[in-house]
Image (cartoon, rainbow, N blue to C red):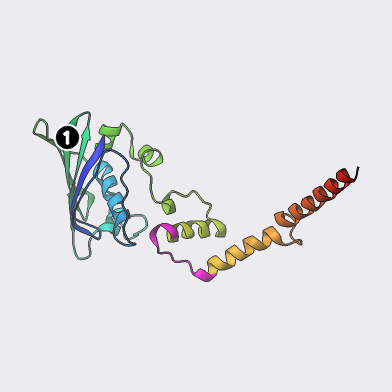
Amino acid sequence: MFIKRIEIGQFGNLKDIALDFKPAANLIVAPNEWGKSTLIDFIFAVFYGMDHNSADLRSSKRSRNMPWGKDSMDGALLFEANGLSYRVSCEFGSQKRMDRIILTDESLGKTYEIENDKPLGKRIFGLGEHSFNQSVYVQQMSLALNVKSDKKGELLHQLASLGTSGASEISSTTVTDSLNNALLSLSSSRRKNAVIPRLETERFQLQESLYEARER
């Protein structure tokens, strides 16, 4: 199957837009804060619905994408599968019980309402939400990184966010300090596992061996 078209009335910071796609690789290039991540959230919501409302914007896509001062979002996604055309119309409210997802088989003119406990993605891909996340669906690097919750892991996570979204709570000073420490650990002869001094020693020894071989 492939997505042919996306129409968004309002979802996150996207409003009154329509995008057409081809059955191949499609590249979306836009400035930071345009809504590329929001578009990905919309596609996922069409196939697997939205989570429950939560005050934590990091863990709740519903809270993160609900337009300011609004209590609903809407849009449509058109896709083709096995030579047949389908349209999915969606409306997401402030609570999960208010959501409606309608699937229309445009070839037969039949309409079906998708129940919350039986997501469309399960029917189409044969995959549950978790399996879809781990295989087909590629999230932002900042969300996909599997790092430990220590200081270095946190730094990697925030750097990934900085690279993909252009925004992060981390300061440039912290980044610079971390990179300098990493360079020091590689280059300082006083560090036990320093790589650069060891390689320099090996290079010198090989050079001496080469001179000896030439003299012989």
Query: Residue 198: horizontal and vertical position, in percent?
Result: 76, 53
Query: Residue 180: horizontal and vertical position, in percent?
Result: 62, 65
- Quarter of the image holding residue 167? bottom left
Would residue 112 appear left or right of 193 to someone viewing this image? left
Q: Which region shows up in magenta?
A: 163-173
Badge 1: how crowded within 10 Å, few (<14), some, or many (20+)? some
What residue is at 11 percent from the left and 31 percent from the top? 107
Residue at the limit of the structure toward the right, as seen here: 216
Residue 168 belongs to the span the image colors magenta = yes
What residue is at 31 percent from the left and 31 percent from the top? 126
Q: What quarter of the picture does the C terminus occupy? A: top right
Residue 106 belongs to the span the image colors magenta = no
Query: Residue 170: horizontal and vertical position, in percent?
Result: 48, 66
What residue is at 44 percent from the left and 61 percent from the top? 162
Would residue 153 appear left or right of 214 to someone viewing this image? left
Q: Amino acid at mark 1?
A: Ser
Q: Which residue is mark 1?
A: 85
Query: Residue 81: horizontal and vertical position, in percent?
Result: 23, 32
Would residue 48 appear left or right of 158 to someone viewing this image? left
Q: In this orientation, which residue lies closer to the viewer: 78 or 215?
A: 215
